[in-house]
Image (spheres, rainbow, N blue to C red):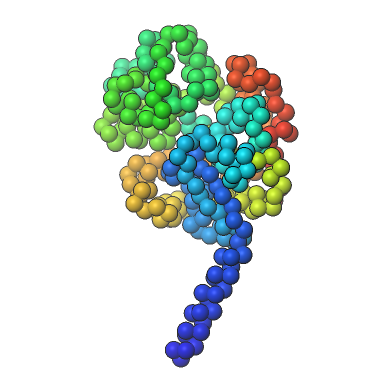
């Protein structure tokens, strides 16, 4: 009986090993350290949805958030996350990138102030210091938001705070920050004892945009692995929305020490409903509206055709 048990244990181990070896490797560069905005990718890995598609997906956290799309364009990784407006700029700059999917189809980006600051409207920003992380589209978002309140960039002082958005507010280095995530920094500041409020770009002169897209190097969009990857994401998103409490446990199991905390728990509740149910779906009107906005603001030199940088990957 003992030998029989050992035989089946060995057989199971061998079968599992062979199955793992059969999976095709895929590298996924996320945009920052793992947090709830990456939940669909993490859950697809933790729940075995990637395995079911025959994929062995390696999730890589970058040291520099600006690099993932560039590394993908250079052929050094398979898929990366990108910010829809940033993708349009990348394509305008000549990077061979193609949007193959959507993670979050609506903005998380916002302009955030502390409630104790006395700033109750965008008009109150006149003469204030505003921190930012990434020049380019963030400046344009801010400029358009200010214009909606009768102000311009000349009425404020811009300060590059890198990615220390919450810290720069708490230290009084700046009065407001642009580029903060409404689902994350608001909770982070509240936990520090300093409640904040957000002003939303899409309600103040900026067209709605996809916060998180998925891109590959041009020519890779027809790779069968890409379709399998998107199928796994779709399964993970459906599972997450149907079982949010269990999905939270699955998510934090990826890195319990780093992820299982109050901040991520609060951010989770605001984040999981925002994931695109169908990551393949392409909102052509939104992509054209954002590109037209960016052309008008001088962020890109010419209007790109949708076919040149987007695709709806078939099942």
Q: Is residue 116 left or right of residue 314?
A: left
**Is residue 147 visible in the rendered structure shown here?**
yes
In the rendered image, the vertical position of residue 120 relative to residue 288, given as above or below: above
Q: Residue at x 62, y 49 (%)?
A: 230
Residue positioned most to the left: 193
Front residue of this view, candidates 190 and 20: 20
Horizontal and vertical percent for residue 289? 64, 24
In the rendered image, the vertical position of residue 98 relative to residue 228, given as above or below: above
In the rendered image, the vertical position of residue 14 relative to residue 142, given as above or below: below
Q: Residue at x 48, y 32 (%)?
A: 108
In the rendered image, the vertical position of residue 263 relative to residue 13, given as above or below: above
Front residue of this view, candidates 47 and 247: 47
Q: Residue at x 31, y 21 (%)?
A: 173
**Is residue 141 visible in the rendered structure shown here?**
no
User: How many numbered marks does the figure carry?
Assistant: 0
Q: Is residue 74 left or right of residue 2?
A: right
Residue positioned most to the bottom: 1
Horizontal and vertical percent for residue 69? 57, 37
Q: Residue at x 60, y 41 (%)?
A: 72
Horizontal and vertical percent for residue 202? 52, 24
Front residue of this view, candidates 172 and 108: 172
Horizontal and vertical percent for residue 40? 51, 48
Front residue of this view, candidates 297 and 73: 73
């Amino acid at each position: 009986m003992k030998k029989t048990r050992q035989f089946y244990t060995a057989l199971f181990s061998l079968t599992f090993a062979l199955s793992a070896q059969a999976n095709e490797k895929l590298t996924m560069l996320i945009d920052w350290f793992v947090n709830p905005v990456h939940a669909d990718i993490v859950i697809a890995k933790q729940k075995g949805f990637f395995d079911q598609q025959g994929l062995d997906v390696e999730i890589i956290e970058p040291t520099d958030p600006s690099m993932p799309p560039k590394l993908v364009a250079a052929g050094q990784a398979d898929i990366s996350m990108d910010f829809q407006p940033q993708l349009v700029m990348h394509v305008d700059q000549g990077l061979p990138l193609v949007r193959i999917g959507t993670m979050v189809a609506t903005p998380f980006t916002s302009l955030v102030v502390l409630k104790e600051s006395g700033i109750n409207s965008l008009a109150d920003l006149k003469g204030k210091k505003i921190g930012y992380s990434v020049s380019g589209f963030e400046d344009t978002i801010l400029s358009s938001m200010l214009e909606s309140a009768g102000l311009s960039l000349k009425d404020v002082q811009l300060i590059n705070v890198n990615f220390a958005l919450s810290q720069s507010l708490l230290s009084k280095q700046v009065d407001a920050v642009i580029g903060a995530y409404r689902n994350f920094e608001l909770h982070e500041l509240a936990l520090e004892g300093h409640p904040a409020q957000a002003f939303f770009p899409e309600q103040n002169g900026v067209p709605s945009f996809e916060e998180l897209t998925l891109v590959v190097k041009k020519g890779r969009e027809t790779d069968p692995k890409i379709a399998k990857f998107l199928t796994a994401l779709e399964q993970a998103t459906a599972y997450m929305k149907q079982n949010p409490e269990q999905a939270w446990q699955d998510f934090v199991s990826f890195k319990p020490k780093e992820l299982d905390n109050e901040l991520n728990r609060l951010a989770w509740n605001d984040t999981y409903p925002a994931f695109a149910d169908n990551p393949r779906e392409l909102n052509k009107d939104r992509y054209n509206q954002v590109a037209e906005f960016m052309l008008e603001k001088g962020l890109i030199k010419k209007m790109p055709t949708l076919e040149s940088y987007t695709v709806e990957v078939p099942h």
